């Protein structure tokens, strides 16, 4: 496998004068919305053409998960129990 297999592309847009953001997977995104990655430059350029200020940027390998979901109450409870158990061992 060549290194090219790990190259990804993103589209950067100017959302306000001097303020930039990357195109996300959903319209009406927030900072928590995952970034939209493209496996080919041509696909990224097609997306960039949809935006007045769209520019394609080449990046390294796309992260496996670009969004960390919040803990559930159960997960938070288990984390607290583990912290307390670790403190008891000290």
Image (cartoon, rainbow, N blue to C red):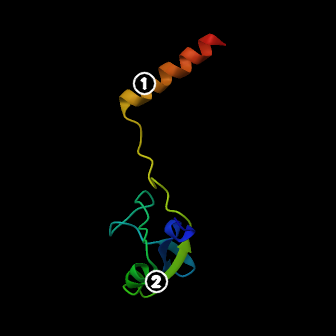
Residue at x 32%, y 70% (from the top left corner): 27
Q: Quadrant of the C terminus?
A: top right
* Residue drawn at point x = 40 percent, y = 30 percent: 75
Q: Is residue 8 above or below residue 71?
A: below
Residue 52 sits in quarter:
bottom left
Residue occupying the point 41% across, 42% down: 70
Q: Percent position (x, y) of residue 55?
A: 50, 83
Q: Position of residue 31 (x, y in %)?
A: 45, 60
Which residue is tagged 1? 77
Q: At x 62% / y 11%, what residue is drawn?
A: 89
Q: Position of residue 21 (x, y in %)?
A: 50, 71
The CA distance from mark 2 to mark 1 is 44 Å
Q: Position of residue 65 (x, y in %)?
A: 45, 53
**As drawn, which residue projects farthest toward the front?**
1
Tell me, for residue 30, which label it has, or none: none
Question: Which residue is denoted by mark 2 in the rendering?
Answer: 54
63 in relation to 24, above or below: above
55 and 40: which one is in front?
40
């Amino acid at each position: 496998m060549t290194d090219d297999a790990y190259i990804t592309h993103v589209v950067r847009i100017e959302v306000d004068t001097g303020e930039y953001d990357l195109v996300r997977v959903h319209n009406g995104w927030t900072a928590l919305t995952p970034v939209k990655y493209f496996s080919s430059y041509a696909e990224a350029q097609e997306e960039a053409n949809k935006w007045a200020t769209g520019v394609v940027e080449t990046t390294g390998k796309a992260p496996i998960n670009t969004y960390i979901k919040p803990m559930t109450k159960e997960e938070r409870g288990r984390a607290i129990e583990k912290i307390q158990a670790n403190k008891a061992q000290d």
